[in-house]
Image (cartoon, rainbow, N blue to C red):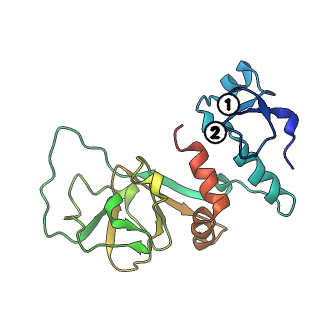
Amino acid sequence: MIDEKKWLCVDAEGFPVEPGSMEETIMFRIDLFIEDLKKANRWDPDYWHISFDKRMDEISTKFSFKKVREFVEHLTYGPIIVDRKMSPSIGNVILINQTEIVFTGLNYNYAVRQNEDSDWVIERAMTQYGDLILARSGVGGVGKNKISIYLEEEQKACVQCFVDLLRVKNINPFYLLVFWKSQYGWNQIYRIING
């Protein structure tokens, strides 16, 4: 249950209303001071919205938490190459951009390919079976919760600069995928999407 003493909710005319009521149009977090905002380094109002605390309060009464960082084996993104234009080739390495990440998985139908010795193919960003592939920027990527799992055993692929590759240990990557696609997981992503 959310401590309603932390919140001041007002309607459009500035009169106090109950938190969560239909008349509520503005909500102020009154238990935080400017020092708290500086400490958390979060100034965007959505980060402090009551809905995030409410959902976490709901789930924390039934389950214990672990942080994703406890399971990270490898986290990286693709090469950042500026001032040069890529010329597609008929190479054997698929380049995974955000356009290849679709709701049902990864779609390589229109993927660009490169040779293994290309500057757009780097060792640290090469995929392995079971790697989580996540859009790392933009409303059309992170904002659409574009996440998938790399399930190819033979095909070589390399994530590109606006895609993260997350390799985990001691946890099934499908669990993380399902969690991040759930209401609770998506709220964690949405809460930090702008910071």
Verify CB contact (< 8 Å) between mark 2 and mark 1: yes
Q: Residue at x 82, y 59 (%)?
A: 64
Q: Quadrant of the C terminus?
A: top right
Q: Nearer the viewer, residue 114 or 163?
A: 163
Residue lying furthest front? 13
Indicate left or right for 125 with 182 as reference. Answer: left
Residue wearing tag 1: 40
Image position of 110 with respect to 22: above or below: below
Secondary structure under the numbered disc 2 in the rendered image: helix
Looking at the rendered structure, the kind of residue marked 2 is Tyr
Q: Residue at x 67, y 30 (%)?
A: 40
Secondary structure under the numbered disc 1 in the rendered image: helix
Q: Residues within 10 Å of mark 2 (few under 14, many from 20)?
A: some
Residue 78 visible in the shown view: yes
Mark closer to the chain start, 2 or 1: 1
Residue wearing tag 2: 47
